[in-house]
Structures are given as C-alpha cells and as structure tokens.
Amino acid sequence: MGDCLSAQQGATGIGDRLLADAAVRTAMEAARSGEPQVLDDQIRLCQIAAPTFHEERRAGEVRALFEKLGLRSVRIDALGNVIGERPGQQERPHLLLAAHLDTVFPEGTDLAVTRDGAVFTGPGIGDNCRGLAAMLGVIRALDAGKIVTPGSITFVANVREEGVGNQGGVRHLLNGEFRGRVDRFLSIDGSGIGFTHLAVGTERYRVTFLGPGGHSYYAFGTANPMHAMGRAIAEIADIQVPADPKTTFSIGRTGGGTSINSIAFDAWMEIDMRSHDPASLRALTAAVRQAVAHAVDTENARWNRRGAVRAEWKELGAAPAGMMPAASPIVEAATSVTRVLGLPIVTFPSTTDANVPISLGIPALTIDGGGSGSGGHSLNEKFVSTDSWKGTQRALLLAIALSYP
C-alpha cells in the first residue's frame, strides 16, 4: 500500500468540491428520498437472528440484496463475510466499506421490532441493523446518481465484531483475501451522527486460581484460591491509571468453589482492560499481572506454602489500540463531509472494526449510521428515525470522498 494511495489529497475541502458535482447531488437526493426503503431494510434484517459466530441467516439475506443491487462478484467467504464489489474508474484507491452482521443476542431471542411513529424498538435495531441498512442505502444512491467513483469500493457485511468475536471478520479479510489491497477502510456502526478515530484497544482475560482445596475445618491452613483471588482483586482495585489517555479496568465476573464448608480448589475472575494508547494498555496489563503474582505469593506465604495455589491466565479477547490523528487526511475528509452537510462534529473513542485496519497502518474510521438511539445491547434498544437520512447521506458522501486519490 503506497502513501500516494492511502493519503488523500485536498481532504480538507473535499465535501464542498463533491457537492458542486451534479451527479453527486442527484445521489444525495436519492439517499434522502430512499430513506423509507432503508428503514424497511433495517427492520427486516433486525428480525433475522445473527448471534456472533452464527450470522449465516442474516448473511444470506444480505447476499441476496447485494446481488439484487447489482454488485459484482458477490460471495460469502470461508468465515461468513458477505462481499460485493463496485468497480471504479481504476482499481485504486480501494475503499473497503463495512457494516457488521452480528448482534450480542443469543439464538432464541424475540427479535420482533415495533414502531411508534419515528421510534423503532427491538434488540439490535441500532447496533448494527442501522449500519447494514445505511450501507445498502449508499449502494442504491450511488446507482441512482450514476456515480462512477475514481477508485473501487468493496462492500462487506462482516461477521464477528461483537464481544468474543474480536473483530474476527475484519481480521480475516485484511490478513487474507484483501491483504495489501485496501487503501482506506470505513465502517458504519450503530445510530447517531458521530465518528470514531480513536480506536480503544481491549485486553480481556480469565484468571483462574488453583489449589488442592479441602474441608473448611479439617484442612484449615491450606492456601485458599478464593482468598488469593480476593487479594488480587484488592490490589488491582488500587492500580492507578492515567486519565489521559483514558485507561480503564473492570473485573466483571467471578466464580468458583463447591460449597460454603469447603476450601475452594478453584476460583476465577474475568477482567476487561481498555485504552486507545497501546503503551498505557501494555502498562496496565503488566500491573495487573504483577498484582496477581503478588497475591498468589502472599497467600502462599500466609500458610507457609501448605497446598500452594497458582494462577493460570486465559485470553478471552483482544482488540488493538491506536488512533488516526485529527490532522490525518481521512479524519479531515470526514470532518469536511460532516461539516458541509450542516452536521455537528462529534467524535468519540470506541472499540470497533476500525481498530484492526488502524493497527495495520490502513487509514480507517467508524461512522454512526444516522438517527439517534438508546439502550444498545438491550432487549429494549430504540432507534429514532428523525432525520436519519442525514446519516445515509453522510456515509454516501464520505464513501465517494474516500474513493478519490
């Protein structure tokens, strides 16, 4: 990937220049007038189950829509990503525009969507059925304006974004079929009008404390995995982390033991650590590991190493940290496009599919899909469609912008 392809020229004013083009204005009007279809797609896709690792039914529907919309070489890859190509005047610069298929809701969840005026309610209606529907709206609008972009655009409905999916769909794409072939990356995720250029990295672990266990009375004096875990939690809670760059930790789940009158033979905790600064995240992980090791040593010393405990670590997931500087061309292009549409500039840090390309040196952003929402990852998630067409328009204009050298 050469710098001449990934670094956009004249990004700061690209929004104004694009809107001076009659074909682009036609496409933008199509995005606005086509919003009822976008909302219909949003509802229909939302009512098809797509739990992480089991997105195949929703993927099949998106594949059919990609084919109906005339994308080239429509296919589902080995991991389940749905891919469709829209050639430009030239192959490069090549934009990969993605929206994730999966939701956090398990198989069997009632996915019915209800509507009360502009308010839609249903699990996943915003995250990420809005992103998928907005992406389809972009494809329709490009065709309505008869837009031939300077570079090519590949549209992807990707799997495994949520939770332990670990951005696996995008990892598979950028380390496999599209390795070295993508110059810019844009994902559409959820509702709202903001965009993300600070990629919050995550490290998640289960730490299991193990020991021989025994009767709470007769084996008293044996080192206790549960007590070792308690010591570790207390030490971790006292770790000092920077406020800027914001760096966080949370022990979200614990478990273990067999009964109240037994010394546990195991105890476990799950910890989530986050920062958009790689060095801060590494430092936090090292501090947590040190706290666990010290807790184990302290528990063993307390009982003169009778039935010594130990700790085992299992990684539950990781997303690379990173950022696109505010002065980078892709952020300048997003700012220009957002501003020319009269939308406020709202940026925020988050963990999204853009983490992966950023870590690989590919200019990348994640944008909201329009409208507004609340209750993400809940059964009562809401999406409000007031002016939601503005999100589709912004995605369209930015996709065109990022296809320019």
Image (tube, rainbow, N blue to C red):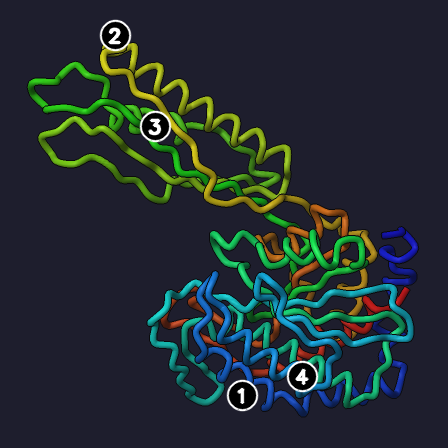
Q: Which quadrant of the figure has residue 268?
A: top left
Residue bearing the label numbered 1: 40
Question: Eyeballing the image, is 16 above or below 215?
Answer: below
Residue 125 seen: yes
Secondary-structure class at tag 3: helix
Give residue 202's position: percent from left, percent from top: 54, 44
Secondary-structure class at tag 4: helix
For discs 4 and 3, the disc positioned in front in the rendered view: 4
Number of dots carrying numbers: 4
Using the numbered discs, state the Cα–Cα distance from disc 1 to disc 4 in whole angstroms. 18 Å
| Nearer-the-camera pick, 27 or 104 | 104
Give residue 332's position: percent from left, percent from top: 80, 59
Give residue 83's position: percent from left, percent from top: 67, 71
Question: Eyeballing the image, is 340 above or below 292?
Answer: below
| Nearer-the-camera pick, 289 or 397 | 289
**Callout 4, which amino acid?**
Glu
Instruction: Give whichever of discs 2 and 3 has the lower sequence position.
Output: 3
Residue depicted at 35% across the width and 30% down the height? 233
Instruction: Give whichever of discs 4 and 3 has the lower sequence position.
Output: 4
**Circle 4: is it few (<14), some (14-19), or many (20+) Cα within 10 Å?**
some
**Callout 2, which amino acid?**
Asn
Using the numbered discs, state the Cα–Cα distance from disc 2 to disc 1 in whole angstroms. 67 Å
For discs 1 and 4, the disc positioned in front in the rendered view: 4
Could you say which disc has been placed on residue 304 in the image?
Answer: 2
Residue bearing the label numbered 3: 234
Instruction: Give whichever of discs 1 and 4 has the lower sequence position.
Output: 1
Secondary-structure class at tag 1: helix
Could you say which disc has been placed on residue 67 in the image?
Answer: 4
Using the numbered discs, state the Cα–Cα distance from disc 4 to disc 3 in whole angstroms. 55 Å
Residue 193 seen: no
